[in-house]
Amino acid sequence: FSYNQVVGARTEAAGFKEATAYSGATVTQEVGGGICQASSTLYEAALLAGLQIDERHPHSMTVAYTEAGKDATVSESGNQDLKFTNNTEHTIYIYAAVDHDEAADKDYARITLFSAPLPYNVVIDNKITDLISYSTVYERDWTGDYAYYTDQVAFQQAGKPGCHCSTDRVFYDAQTGEELLREHLSDDVYNPLNERYWRGVHNRDGSLAN
């Protein structure tokens, strides 16, 4: 299974819209942004089904919709895909749907894999081994839309720390609970997202600061 092959090109003509996406250590907007929520959900479903993972890439930074080590970013331009193999003896049916939570007024992707009962249970063991602190960055606001004077600052973007994450997949016998296999999946590094503020570029006498 190849996620990129199934989903196809992320273009407006194909119905994709502009949404939040990561570009290195910054947040941007691009057509097809947010598509990694579905690929990450499918990745975790494939892990819990015990399937063979052939290709998976972490995001450059942690994401809000799943834990570190459980995400799977995809990118056409970066040649990043999510690929897995059905290494069971049975056919697998992938069912995907979007559910709307009225109380939270949010949409959620739900992905279910249907097949024969498995003789094992799977647990994803992901551990944060180290945190990476973020920095505070000040950008000069040449437009004056947010901060005009050099002693004025305006909030632009909240920061969040990065981390190192180690992830294993553990198989347990469905009947006895005995540990059958521990498989090391990945050692991922997630960059911090710097906290950003606008700072004005004019002195109080109206002149431009150096």
Image (cartoon, rainbow, N blue to C red):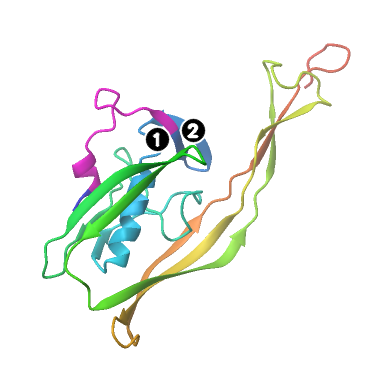
Residue 33 is marked as 1
Query: Mark 1 belongs to which amino acid?
Result: Gly
Q: Quadrant of residue 118?
A: bottom left
Given this view, does label 2 or label 1 mark the residue nearer the observer? 1
Q: Position of residue 36 (x, y in %)?
A: 37, 45
Residue 202 is marked as none
Question: Badges 2 and 1: C-beta atoms under 8 Å apart?
Answer: yes
Q: CA distance from mark 2 to mark 1?
A: 9 Å
Horizontal side, residue 114 vs residue 101: left or right = left
Q: Look at 31% across and 29% down and name the residue there.
A: 16
**Is 39 in the magenta?**
no
Query: Does 16 appear above or below 117?
Result: above
Residue at the extreme front of the image, as rendered: 103
Earlier residue among tags 2 and 1: 2
Query: Does 180 appear above or below 158?
Result: below
The residue lying toward the viewer, choosing from 54 and 140, is 54
Q: Position of residue 105 (x, y in %)?
A: 49, 37
The residue that mark 2 highlights is 28
Q: Look at 58% across and 50% down and name the residue there.
A: 192
Residue at the extreme right of the image, as rendered: 205
**Is 17 in the magenta?**
yes
Q: Quadrant of residue 84?
A: bottom left
In the rendered structure, which segment of residues is drawn in magenta? 3-19
Residue at the extreme top of the image, as rendered: 206
Binning the other alpha carbons within 10 Å of mark 1 as few (below 14), some (14 to 19) or many (20 upward) gives some
Query: Does 88 appear above or below 138?
Result: below
Q: Position of residue 20 (x, y in %)?
A: 46, 35
Horizontal side, residue 137 vs residue 72: left or right = right
The residue lying toward the viewer, choosing from 12 and 108, is 108
Judging from the image, what secondary structure is the residue with disc 1 in? Answer: loop
